[in-house]
Structures are given as C-alpha cells and as structure tokens.
Image (cartoon, rainbow, N blue to C red):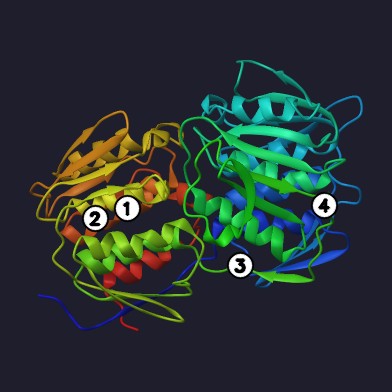
C-alpha cells in the first residue's frame, strides 16, 4: 500500500557541468565566479590539476572563485608537472587534452584502475597537433608524459569508440591553438552526444567562436549544434577559432545522473519522490531517465522547478542506452522490480568505466535475488524474487554508481549495505544523508 506522503530531495549540482565550467573559468582571463559547482572528489581532482597548470581557486559558500591561467596551461621545463587523476575518468580525459594545448611537460597519472583505462585514441589526436607523447608503462594507457608547445591547429581526427569525453577535451582545448582547428569525428560508432552538447554550451557561454558542420549533398554545411541528434562518424566536424574564454559568472544546474537514484526510488518505493533543481529541458543526456521510467510504466510529473515520480507498477522494456551510459546501473536495479525482462543495449563501453559496470550490475542484481545476462553490448535483467527481510552487503567495486544504485534494493525490504559507502564521495558526498530520507519516508 502506497502513501501520499511526498519525499523531497534537492538535486546535487551537475558533475559534468561543474568540470566544464571550472575548466572554462581557468581558461578565462581575470576572475570568474562559478555558482553552485558540485563539491566532490572528482571535481577536486580537476581543480587540483588546473591549479598545477596555473589557475587559482577560492571556495566560498555556494560558489567557487576562479583566477584564470595567464597565457594558458603551464607545464614543467626540466621535469613534468604532475597531474594526478586518481580515479576520475572525466578529469583524465578532459585534462589530458587541455595539457596538450599547454606549454611544457606534463605527466598524467592515477590509480591502478585508471592505468587500465585506455587513452590512446586521444593521444593520437594530440600527436597530430605536434605534442610529443611518451607512455611510461603500457602503450595507449596512463601514466603518460606529454611535451608540448601548444596546439598547431589545422586538421584533427578523433574516434569516440571509447568515450565522447575525448572530443569534449579537444573542443575545450582547441581555442588555444595557433590557428583555426577542424576536428572531424571518425570511427564506426559514436556515443554520448549530449555530453558534447554540454561542452559546446559552456564554450558558447564563455564566448568561444566555433561552428558545427555536417555533410549535405557531399559538402560541409554549418548547422545549429542544438539541433544535432546524433553523431555519424565522417559526417560531422567542429571548427574552432582561436578564442579567449571570458565570463564573469555562470551557474551549474542540478545533476540528472545523481538524481536518477531518487527518481527510481519514487517509482519502486512506497512514497512519491520529488527532486528539486532538475531542469526538464536540460542538455544533460541523463535526463533520459524520465523517458525510460515512463516507458516502464512510471507516473511522472514535472514543472519548472523539478520532477516528481509516483509509486508505479513497472514492466520490462528494451532500451538503447548508448547516450546515457551512467544510468545503466540505476535502470538495471529498477528493472529488478518490474514484471518482465528488460534488455539494455549499446553499452559495450561500460566495460571500461570505474569497473566493468555490465558484469558488476549483473552480479549485484543476482545477489539481490534477480537474474541477469551480459553480452558484448547488452545486459538483460530478468526479475526474480528479491530477498525481502535479508541483510545483503552489496559489492561496490570502488564505483560510486554501483554503491548508489544498489541502495535502491532497500525499497524491496532488503537491508541493503554498501561494502564501501565512502566511494560515493567521488560524485555525491551527501548521498547517504539524502538517502536516509527515502528509507525513513520523510515528507516534504
């Protein structure tokens, strides 16, 4: 039996936009105020790397003041400047590109897991810009040392088989090139276009001059980037002019990825859940959680201030989640509450995240009493009898999204315990405090 008591949660600020806004601020001349950036370990890694390259940060209540790098990213002369990524994949991909556009020597390094995550496609693009690349251990993987005198500009190609963040990093760095830079997407497959849109939006807000062009009748034609729906390799390119970033202030909106756990809780729990601070017209790809939950049968209402999800009977679906891969653990757990199987496709790249998120999600669903199958490019969730009344310690794989998604199993009557609850500090340090409202059914 459900209750009309509504649980109210404020969405944390967007991690993706916080990375990009702080980078843009660090690229700007003078001072920029970034309002409501996320306070998390990943964001601190990006700020630390930008500090090592010459930016300055002052954190105040609800805002971060950024003093930009004078003359662009600076590396070491005789010894590389150390850029410590730890376990932040976003930091690694964005900052590596940015370091390539700087001057001097830079060493990109992180945890052992980070050293197992490929970066070779990005470094090949950097080499085309005159950057000298030396892998310290394994070819194509961090640690890597870059020696650069800035981007030369001109033609550059990048494959997005592994991550759209490669393109985002190159786009953010390209305004520092010596001349106009044309970045063409190549390869067989494109993923996560919405994250590229977030990057372009920040660049536009900071006054960077760029154009997006697509093939039409065999010719390159400029198009409105807001109207792009998919990236077809070989049929889209980005032209970035040498530009100066400039903005007095910018505000970071709420994070749909981190809001997804609470939206799913509204659908499978006993109380409606309202998330304030989520923009329904956001460019964030993970806004797709609304469409996915609706397709599964969830009742959802939204307004200009947020989204409310009501307890609903869910059914299984087949869904392509190539554009919103961070939602896969959330949807996998929600699908365990449905009345039929759910198949999630186009997600091969999840195998090289903080962990192999396909195998990890399947393992934890099975641990809770469900069934799961994993293929090269899909995961299938087959609902079973969840282990109500049992205490289950869910493995977290040093992966924040596994820890937060498996918390949803507590709404099945399971005493769900995260093996390493602190790993959520990577993106959402206050998660457990907010999740207590879900478990206790605190009203709004």
Q: Quadrant of residue 152?
A: top right
Spatial CA span between label 4 and label 3 = 20 Å
**Residue at position x 87%, y 59% from top?**
29
Q: Are marks 1 and 3 in contact (CB under 8 Å)?
A: no
Q: Give the left or right position of residue 136, taking residue 283 as reference.
A: right
Q: What residue is shown at x 14% (from left), y 50% (from top)?
A: 390
According to the picture, the residue beneath numbered tag 3 turns out to be: 252
N-terminal-most mark, 4 or 3: 4
Q: Note whether 259 is above or below 70 in the view shown.
A: below
Q: Quadrant of the C terminus?
A: bottom left
Mark 1 closeness class: few <14, some 14–19, many ≥20 residues within 10 Å: many
C-alpha separation, residue under disc 1 versus residue under disc 3: 23 Å
Question: Which residue bears the numbered disc 1?
Answer: 330
Residue under numbered circle 2: 334
Q: CA distance from mark 1 to mark 4?
A: 36 Å
Q: Whole-percent x and y of residue 367?
A: 20, 40
Mark 3 → mark 2, Cα distance in angstroms: 28 Å
234 w.r.t. 133: above or below:
below
Q: Earlier in the sequence, mark 3 or mark 2?
A: 3
Q: Which residue is mark 4?
A: 55
Residue lying furthest front = 217
**Quadrant position of residue 180:** top right
Is 123 situated left or right of 401 in this image? Answer: right
C-alpha distance separating marks 4 and 2: 42 Å
């Amino acid at each position: 039996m459900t209750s009309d008591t509504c649980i109210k949660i404020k969405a944390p600020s967007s991690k993706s936009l916080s990375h990009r806004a702080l980078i843009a601020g660090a690229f700007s001349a003078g001072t920029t105020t970034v309002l409501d950036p996320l306070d998390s370990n990943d964001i601190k890694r990006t700020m630390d790397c930008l500090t090592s390259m010459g930016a300055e940060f002052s954190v105040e209540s609800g805002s971060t003041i950024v003093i930009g790098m004078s003359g662009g990213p600076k590396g070491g002369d005789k010894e590389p400047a150390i850029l410590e990524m730890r376990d932040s994949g976003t930091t690694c991909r964005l900052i590596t590109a940015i370091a390539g556009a700087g001057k001097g020597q830079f060493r990109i390094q992180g945890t052992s897991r980070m050293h197992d995550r490929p970066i070779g496609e990005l470094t090949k693009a950097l080499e085309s810009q005159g950057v000298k690349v030396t892998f310290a251990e394994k070819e194509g993987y961090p640690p890597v040392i870059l020696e650069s005198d800035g981007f030369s500009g001109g033609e550059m190609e990048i494959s997005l088989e592994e991550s759209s963040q490669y393109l985002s990093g190159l786009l953010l760095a390209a305004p520092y090139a010596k001349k106009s830079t044309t970045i063409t997407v190549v390869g067989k497959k494109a993923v996560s276009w919405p994250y590229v849109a977030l990057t372009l939006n920040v660049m536009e807000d900071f006054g960077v001059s760029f154009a997006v062009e697509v093939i039409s009748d065999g010719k390159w034609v400029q198009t409105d980037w807001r109207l792009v729906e998919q990236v077809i390799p070989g049929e889209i390119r980005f032209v970035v002019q040498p530009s100066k970033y400039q903005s007095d202030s910018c505000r970071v909106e709420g994070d749909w990825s981190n809001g997804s756990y609470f939206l799913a809780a509204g659908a499978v729990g006993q109380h409606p859940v309202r998330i304030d601070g989520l923009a329904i017209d956001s460019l964030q790809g993970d806004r797709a959680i609304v469409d996915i939950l609706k397709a599964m049968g969830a009742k959802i209402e939204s307004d200009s201030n947020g989204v409310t999800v009501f307890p609903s009977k869910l059914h299984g679906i087949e869904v392509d989640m190539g554009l919103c891969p961070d939602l896969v653990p959330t949807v996998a757990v929600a699908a365990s509450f449905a009345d039929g199987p759910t198949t999630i496709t186009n997600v091969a790249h999840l195998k090289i995240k903080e962990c192999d998120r396909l195998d990890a999600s399947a393992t934890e669903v099975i641990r809770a009493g469900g069934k799961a199958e994993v293929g090269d490019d899909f995961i299938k969730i087959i609902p079973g009898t969840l282990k109500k009344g049992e205490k289950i310690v869910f493995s977290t794989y040093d992966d924040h999204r596994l820890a937060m998604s498996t918390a949803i199993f507590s709404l099945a009557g399971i005493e769900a315990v995260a093996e390493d609850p602190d790993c959520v500090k990577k993106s959402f340090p206050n998660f457990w405090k907010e999740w207590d409202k879900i478990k206790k059914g605190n009203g709004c």
